[in-house]
């Protein structure tokens, strides 16, 4: 994997819409800041019109979805390097999602970093994830997230429905 593009220039990173298999308004991240063979860092700005915004911000429970979408963007970028499009994946769960605050405050800019820990041939993967406040550089949340990317999502979904 080390032969893949390392730290492409920001101009070479496609828009987030091309990296995740989601459509608006379910795309929660704003953009990918940098990516390499094992790590991706994305950005999300908490605005009054952010999905799940209530009162003073977005509940920190949404952080696990920010992490999952950053993992999806990582997988989508890696697929693009192979000339493929973004594929459907599944969030299996997390170990010890810990967050230092109950709400991501309106006006804050978060950096979501995901680092590949394990990728098995059967599509199972594990990532170390963090959410950091861009201004203060304080780590706000962390988790180890498990995901599954089937080789053929349609076939997998049809088989699981029987």
Image: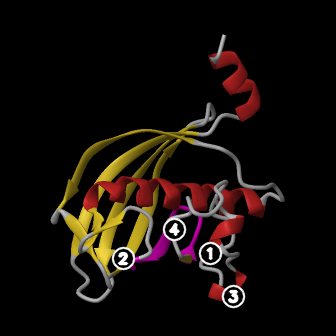
Q: Which residue is mark 2?
A: 110
Q: Which residue is mark 1?
A: 6
- The residue positioned 36% from the left and 76% from the top of the image is 110
**Which of pointers 3 and 2 lies earlier in the amino acid sequence?**
3
Question: Of the residues tagged 1 and 2, which is closer to the observer?
Answer: 2
Q: Which residue is mark 4?
A: 40
User: What's the mark number on residue 11?
Assistant: 3
- The residue positioned 67% from the left and 54% from the top of the image is 21
- With respect to residue 25, does 13 lie above or below? below
Image quadrant containing the C terminus: top right
Whether residue 39 appears in magenta in the rendering, the answer is: yes
Percent of width and height locating residue 103: 22, 67
- The residue positioned 69% from the left and 25% from the top of the image is 156
Viewer-side residue, 41 vs 36: 41
SS type, badge 3? helix
**Which of pointers 3 and 4 lies earlier in the amino acid sequence?**
3
Percent of width and height locating residue 72: 57, 55
User: Disc 1 and disc 2: Cα gap in Å?
Assistant: 23 Å
């Amino acid at each position: 994997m080390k032969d893949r593009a390392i730290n492409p220039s920001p101009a070479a990173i496609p828009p987030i819409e091309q990296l995740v298999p989601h459509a608006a308004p379910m795309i929660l991240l704003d953009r990918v800041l940098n990516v390499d063979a094992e790590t991706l860092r994305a950005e999300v700005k908490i605005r009054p019109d952010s999905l799940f915004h209530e009162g003073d911000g977005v509940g920190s429970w949404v952080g696990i979805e920010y992490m999952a979408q950053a993992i999806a963007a990582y997988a989508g970028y890696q697929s693009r390097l192979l000339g493929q499009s973004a594929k459907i994946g599944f969030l299996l769960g997390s170990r010890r999602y810990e967050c230092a605050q109950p709400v991501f405050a309106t006006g804050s800019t978060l950096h979501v970093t995901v680092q590949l820990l394990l990728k098995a041939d059967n599509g199972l993967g594990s990532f170390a994830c963090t959410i950091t406040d861009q201004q203060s550089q304080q780590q706000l949340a962390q988790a180890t997230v498990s995901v599954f990317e089937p080789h053929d999502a349609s076939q997998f979904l049809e088989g699981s429905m029987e």
